[in-house]
Image (cartoon, coloured by chain):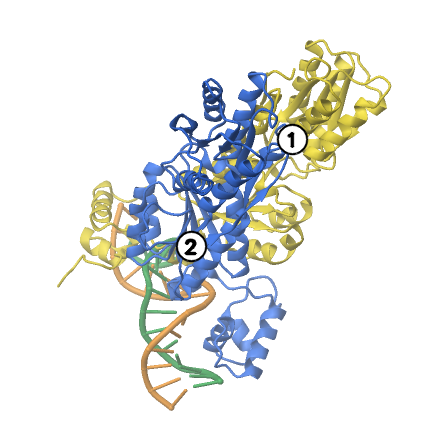
Chain colours: A yellow, B blue, C green, D orange
Amino acid sequence: MAAESKAKPTYSEIAAAAGVSEATVSRVLNGDERVHPDRAKRVRKAVEKMGYSRNRAAAALASGKTGLIAIVIEDDLGVFEDPFWATVSSGVSKVLMANELQTLLMVTQANKVDGAIARYLDSGEVDGAIFFQLHRDTLVKNLSKHGLPVVVVGAPHKDSGLVYVDVDQRGGGHIATNQLFEAGCERLAMITGDVGTTAGRRRLDGFLDACSEAEYRAPKQYILNGDFSFESGKALMSKLLALKIPPDGVFCANDLMAAGAIAALEEAGLSCPDDVRIVGFDDSVIAQTVRPPLTSVRQDITGLGETAASLMIKLLQGIKVTPVVLPTELVIRASC
Amino acid sequence: MAAESKAKPTYSEIAAAAGVSEATVSRVLNGDERVHPDRAKRVRKAVEKMGYSRNRAAAALASGKTGLIAIVIEDDLGVFEDPFWATVSSGVSKVLMANELQTLLMVTQANKVDGAIARYLDSGEVDGAIFFQLHRDTLVKNLSKHGLPVVVVGAPHKDSGLVYVDVDQRGGGHIATNQLFEAGCERLAMITGDVGTTAGRRRLDGFLDACSEAEYRAPKQYILNGDFSFESGKALMSKLLALKIPPDGVFCANDLMAAGAIAALEEAGLSCPDDVRIVGFDDSVIAQTVRPPLTSVRQDITGLGETAASLMIKLLQGIKVTPVVLPTELVIRASC
DNA sequence: CTGAAAGCGCTTACAG
DNA sequence: CTGAAAGCGCTTACAG
């Protein structure tokens, strides 16, 4: 006779305890307004008392909604090891959890995204997908066309109607470059990131914007294409230093390359900021640990994740949304 | 008459196409050996041809298995922003996916772990849970006792029978310290991590082991308790330098503190490694970007995640498992 | 080795 | 505003 003992209660127990039907229990738990307040209260009391928690699998099967949102990240070169994405993920997860949704983490190689992952996402296993580090837009566009709610973190290459969040990469490049001008630099150079990525391209655009505003035209040898790695920052800085007239200010498209650039300066027996001023981008730990500490562009990384999740939730509710661009801010330290 | 068109096929279509019963389809898809090879082949062919993919919710409801493993991380101070955990997660995710399991990412505040999360985990919503950054063992122990398969990344405080994976923290501390001795240091000091964590404590133990092997006894002022932050590394190094006889070699319990220590040296006008040699722990990006590049203890972080996932899979299969300790290795750079 | 059938715990038209 | 009932798509004893 040990009623109300071990096993998880189901709707039938709750319904019995509250003196209503299972349908009513379901309505109350799903926030259906039309239930009479008194009965709703009875249901909630029973739920509370019996420690009820919904069986998601059953709900998913019956409703077609899984309550799961996938984060898909293409991890060819250990991108996920970049703290950046982890921070974005944590922002996503927090907002999703607060909205009764769960985060499915799918770390996969880019070449596998088309196969198993695409099928998985497309077969109703998740209610939506948030993509990080977009290499090719096609898959995402297809999924989106098939009706899967999709949000992309980082602007896609072509404005294909996808909903995305990004930080103001171009504006960031702009303020970074302005800082160099304001510090008195006259020969500005830039070590770009991978310009095949939208972030890389737009940071460069921001640099160019600021230069033309200042009526400065950087010589061709002053704009060198890096790939966001420490090594490339170092190698390209050495290249700049080898020029007949080296620059006196360099904007590096991320902190890692900036750290590389500082290392190159040091090896050449030069000082930052005395000989060459440097500005980075990301405001990562590296900006703080490198000597001299790096002036860098800060982006609200958790905010990126939170915004992505919020957009997803709106999408799920059928609310129309447009891309969001988050502001960017300069953190000034000793390097410039 | 457009058979085989849009909608996702279900068992009944597959069964019809293969000329078997739904039960047989289920058996084949679940790897039941007892099905006749020919019929199994027919089923697989139909599955292939019709692009069938299992509805997880239905399977979960019927079987009681969700195919979901939770990663739970207590994220009070932005721990998840530490690339360390992201890397572990990606290792977990990859192994799990390869085994048809999905990774549920639950980033939560420590004080909330007891409430909603515990209930969630305990109510059959996941098949198992992998915990990161364990603050209190009790919750985990309870869940484990309730029968939820649990794996912990990082050794728990008391050996409470939980299954865990960790790297050989103590051995790592040992080799780091030995390196200092071998480089000729005679006055070794240590800036510890948070010794409330098992990692912090064990790295210190390793230091002590190596010292006693070398018949060296570090004076009390030479062992300072940091908290793994850049700031603490810097402050404690300054403290060491202020001593009448400062150390000539310092083992810092992580790279971030080591970077702080180097910054302090520099501010004091001293050189690493000429005046003081330094060894870190983690072999993170920081080890490579700091000047001088840091000698540091490398741990197989992806391996931690992969091992955690493997242990979980064995647990799910009912195989008995014991804790795993991964080896650690010294990466030598300029700082020592 | 195989199939018929019950059942997992919800949701949702439908009828009132 | 509410309930009876069908149904979501699998799994799994059970009987053969």
Which disc number belongs to residue A63?
2
Left or right: where does residue A165 sit relative to residue A37? Answer: right
Q: Is residue A99 visible?
A: no
Q: Position of residue D13 (x, y in %)?
A: 33, 78
**Crowdedness near tag 1: few (<14), some (14–19) or many (≥20) residues, C-alpha within 10 Å:** many
Disc 1, SS: helix
Q: Which residue is at a point 53% across and 56% down the rendered structure image?
A: B95
- Between the C-alphas of marks 2 and 1, the distance is 47 Å
Q: Nearer the viewer, residue B104 or B289?
A: B289
Q: Farthest residue in the front direction? A: B215
Chain ID, mark 1? A
Q: Farthest residue in the left direction? A: A1
Left or right: where does residue B163 sit relative to residue B302? Answer: left
Q: Is residue A229 above or below residue A11?
A: above
Q: Which residue is at a point 51% across and 80% down the rendered structure image?
A: B20
Q: Nearer the viewer, residue A284 or C1?
A: A284
Q: Is residue B131 above or below residue B31?
A: above
Q: Earlier in the sequence, mark 2 or mark 1?
A: 2
Q: Amino acid at mark 1?
A: Leu
Chain ID, mark 2? A
* Residue ID for mark 1: A256
Q: Is residue D14 above or below residue A245?
A: below
Q: Nearer the viewer, residue B90 or A307?
A: B90
Q: Which residue is at a point 51% across and 47% down the rendered structure image?
A: B88
Q: Is residue A61 above or below residue A44?
A: below
Which disc number belongs to residue B181?
none
Does the CB distance between marks 2 and 1 fall below 8 Å?
Answer: no
Q: Amino acid at mark 2?
A: Ser
Q: In front: mark 2 or mark 1? A: 1
